[in-house]
């Protein structure tokens, strides 16, 4: 392959039979369907095609049956320019299939028959050794054999993404620490961390902290219409929340998760210098596009719908503070300090703090106030207090301070003697 390899995907390939119904049937209930279609699916192939439709160079490592469905699928992958060198057809085994029912409000159930997918093993990782060496990003899921998936993650030296879907109960703890980025939905996050539920970003932060503590290098917790929460072991003190993109019209949510993963892998491979929040925001846009269209792979955006400059638009995200104050509505309290865009704020915060420290520097007012307190005059008042005690009227002296005292002494001195001194001139007259 002449061009650089962006993404290698190790996963499943299925034929999907999708039926649309007004509401999902209850056990034993018959529901009339409104529409049915047959699509190419399987999480591995879905995510590979999602990345390829955006423009990534991709390689799929998977198994198909040696049947008509397998032949059709192989041609379909080649039409999307997926390298199928390591997609093998297994004799005497059918291609995997999935039966999916989707209700009008987007709820769904899925029944999966593995078929030829069970023959995907760790040996296939060794057969695709060159692709594992050349690719920038590896995508894995949980539809394949667990040991084979762990082998693929160990062999890969680039950026590896593990989509913990479908969630399984037998996940070894060692698996959490293998990928570069662990991607889980809120149900899987609650299961892996023994939490009752993860329903808001504040709880998602706690779950991410727990997963980091269990060995995860970095974690993305997808939360549907609430967006996604991201935390990395390198900067575990900071957890970010990237809101979801708007979905104008909900048609089918069955392919949203795979659209998100394929887009995430594509943007990480093509824009490695941008932040993970940029990559998540771009993946949200592709997932929202998928939810507005029916089908799985047919709903994925192509180059004309999600341009290569999608990552260059400034993402909107906020920091989730540690939930030290525990209140009833914890997330609302966490939002009370207004969240801001992460990238520019640290430098601005330091500069603002320095600017705020400058006004306290001029400290002349405190010394001036001390001088105005007039402690010296109080010291001078002490001698007059003795004079006040000598004079009978101390009360007026207290109300009138020092200035009136000299006036009082001047009036008291010789008022009447002056009158007596004037008497002799009256006698002379």
Image (cartoon, rainbow, N blue to C red):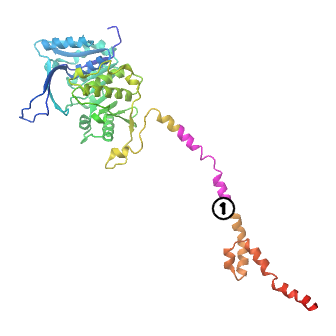
Residue at (25% x, 29% y) in the render: 164
The 10 Å Cα crowd at callout 1, few under 14, some 14 to 19, many 20 or more, is few
Residue farthest along the top direction in this orientation = 2
Residue at (68% x, 79% y) in the render: 394
The part of the chain drawn in magenta is 351-371
Residue at (72% x, 81% y) in the render: 391
Q: Nearer the viewer, residue 415 or 348?
A: 415
Where does residue 312 sit, x and y in percent of width and height? 41, 24
Q: In this view, does 267 lie to the left or right of 421?
A: left
* Rendered-image quadrant of the N terminus: top left
Where does residue 117 sit, x and y in percent of width and height? 17, 19
Residue at (72% x, 77% y) in the render: 386
- The residue that mark 1 highlights is 373
Where does residue 48 sit, x and y in percent of width and height? 26, 19
Where does residue 50 sit, x and y in percent of width and height? 27, 20
Query: Which image quadrant is residue 153 in?
Result: top left
Does residue 47 show up? Answer: yes
Query: Which image quadrant is residue 146 in?
Result: top left
* 96 part of magenta stretch: no
The mark tally for this picture is 1
Q: In this view, does 350 lie to the left or right of 229?
A: right
Q: Nearer the viewer, residue 300 or 67?
A: 300
* Rendered-image quadrant of the C terminus: bottom right
Q: Which of 103 and 153 is in front in this view?
A: 103
Depicted 24 relative to depicted 14: above or below:
below
Circle 1 sits in a helix, a strand or a loop, which is it? loop
């Amino acid at each position: 392959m002449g061009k650089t390899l962006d993404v290698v995907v190790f996963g499943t390939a299925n034929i999907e039979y999708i039926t649309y119904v007004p509401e999902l049937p209850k056990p034993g209930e018959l529901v009339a369907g409104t529409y049915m279609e047959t699509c190419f699916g399987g999480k591995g192939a879905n995510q590979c095609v999602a990345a390829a439709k955006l423009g990534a160079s991709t390689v799929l490592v998977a198994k198909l049956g040696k049947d008509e469905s397998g032949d059709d699928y192989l041609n379909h992958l080649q039409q999307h320019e997926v390298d199928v060198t390591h997609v093998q057809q297994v004799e005497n085994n059918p291609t995997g299939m999935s039966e999916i029912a989707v209700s009008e409000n987007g709820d769904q159930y899925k029944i999966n028959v593995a078929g030829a997918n069970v023959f995907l093993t760790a040996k296939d990782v060794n057969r695709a050794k060159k692709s594992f060496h050349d690719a920038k990003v590896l995508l894995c899921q949980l539809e394949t054999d667990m040991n084979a998936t762990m082998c693929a993650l160990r062999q890969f030296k680039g950026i590896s993404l593990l989509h913990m879907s479908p969630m399984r109960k037998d996940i070894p703890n060692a698996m959490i620490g293998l990928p570069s980025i662990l991607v889980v939905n809120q149900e899987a996050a609650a299961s892996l961390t023994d939490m009752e539920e993860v329903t808001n970003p504040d709880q998602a932060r706690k779950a991410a902290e727990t997963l980091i503590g269990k060995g995860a290098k970095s974690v993305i917790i997808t939360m549907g219409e609430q967006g996604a929460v991201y935390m990395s072991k390198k900067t575990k003190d900071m957890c970010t929340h990237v809101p979801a993109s708007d979905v104008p019209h909900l048609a089918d949510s069955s392919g949203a998760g795979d659209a998100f993963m394929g887009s995430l892998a594509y943007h990480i491979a093509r824009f490695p210098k941008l932040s993970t929040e940029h990559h998540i925001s771009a993946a949200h846009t592709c997932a929202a596009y998928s939810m507005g269209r029916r089908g799985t792979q047919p709903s994925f955006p192509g180059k004309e719908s999600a341009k290569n400059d999608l990552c260059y638009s400034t993402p909107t995200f906020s920091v989730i503070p540690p939930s030290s104050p525990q209140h009833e509505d914890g997330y609302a309290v966490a939002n009370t300090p207004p969240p801001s865009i992460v990238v520019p704020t640290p430098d601005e915060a330091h500069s603002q703090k320095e600017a705020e420290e400058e006004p306290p520097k001029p400290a002349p007012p405190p010394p001036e106030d001390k001088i105005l307190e007039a402690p010296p005059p109080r010291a001078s008042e002490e001698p007059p207090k003795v004079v006040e005690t000598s004079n009978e009227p101390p009360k007026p002296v207290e109300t009138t301070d020092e200035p009136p005292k000299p006036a009082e002494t001047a009036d008291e001195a010789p008022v009447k003697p002056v009158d007596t001194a004037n008497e002799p001139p009256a006698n002379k007259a």
